Image (cartoon, rainbow, N blue to C red):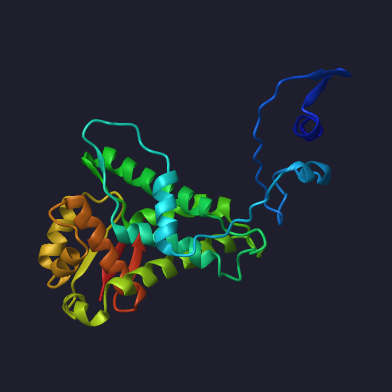
Amino acid sequence: IQVGLLNIMEERDVQIRGYRVRLPLDVFVVASANPEDYTNRGRIITPLKDRYGAQIRTHYPKNMETEIAIMEQERSRFEEDGDLRVNVPSYMKEIVAEVTRLARRSPDINQRSGVSVRASIADYEALLANAYRRAIRIGEKEIVPRISDLPYLVPTISGKLEFETVEEGREEQIIDRLMQGAVLAVFNRYFSLGELEAVVAKFKAGYSVEVGHQTPSADYTKIVKQTEGLDAAVEKLGAGRSRPAIASAAEFVLEGLHLNKRLNRDKIAGRFQYRG
């Protein structure tokens, strides 16, 4: 194919079984390549590269806002399905973008191969897909991603990264650490620990809750009402009266407190129990 392109781009003709055929071609050829990694694609041969009129070197998004804008623009859309509505809280978008940004600085990730914004797009799509599945299964009309959806991003993330380690089972640990770091960073941008002391005190008094990605949103509404201080935190995140949004916000606050070592968390049969 590349040899054929040589003639098309320079001589404006093609050869078919040795016969030169001149065609009134009006083509604009654009090619993309990662100069550091040709593992899964062919290298552009030097004579063909000389035919290109310009070369543009791209870079990672310079800030999180740009990364999120690209994620939103490029993600696959769900087909219209009755009354289902997608509502992604800003902190969940930031967590997905932060995972990618942390991966770009991680010594466990091959930085020569890089971590493109395609990783953010794929992770965002996987997050929404699991939220969509949950909404269908438990009969809710609003699709809102939660923290408990993040483990379902592992296969997607692992397919977009090239790891430095070859140790079996280590890749999942690296991804888990990236996701925890992202949640912690985003949580600390939204809250100071001082404003959640009432929530921590409730759990220290012996209170505990159990949540999971299949837990109905109505259950979280009860948790928020029973936990002093949690309602104010959920309101600060802009959940409003939407039960699925309240569920997402409650999980975000609880996980943030756990990662800040203010709550303990146990994993029980695919669900998470938070306690003091």
Question: Residue 30 appears at what percent x and percent y?
Answer: 64, 40
Question: Residue 197 appears at what percent x and percent y?
Answer: 19, 80
Question: Residue 111 appears at what percent x and percent y?
Answer: 63, 64
For the N terminus, the image quarter is top right
Dividing the picture into quarters, in which one does residue 259 lie? bottom left
Q: Specify whether 65 is left or right of 104.
A: left
For the C terminus, the image quarter is bottom left
Q: Specify whether 32 is left or right of 226.
A: right
Q: Specify whether 246 is left or right of 263.
A: left
**Residue at the limit of the structure toward the right, as seen here:** 18
Question: Which of 171/21 is in front?
Answer: 21
In the image, what residue occupies the spot 28% across and 31% down? Answer: 81
In the image, what residue occupies the spot 64% across and 63% down? Answer: 110
Question: Which of 245/36 is in front?
Answer: 36
Dividing the picture into quarters, in which one does residue 143 lie? top left
Task: Give above or below for 239 relative to 134.
Answer: below
Task: Give above or below for 40 relative to 14.
Answer: below
In the image, what residue occupies the spot 42% across and 67% down? Answer: 182
Question: Which of 234/254 is in front?
Answer: 234
Task: Give above or below for 172 relative to 134.
Answer: below
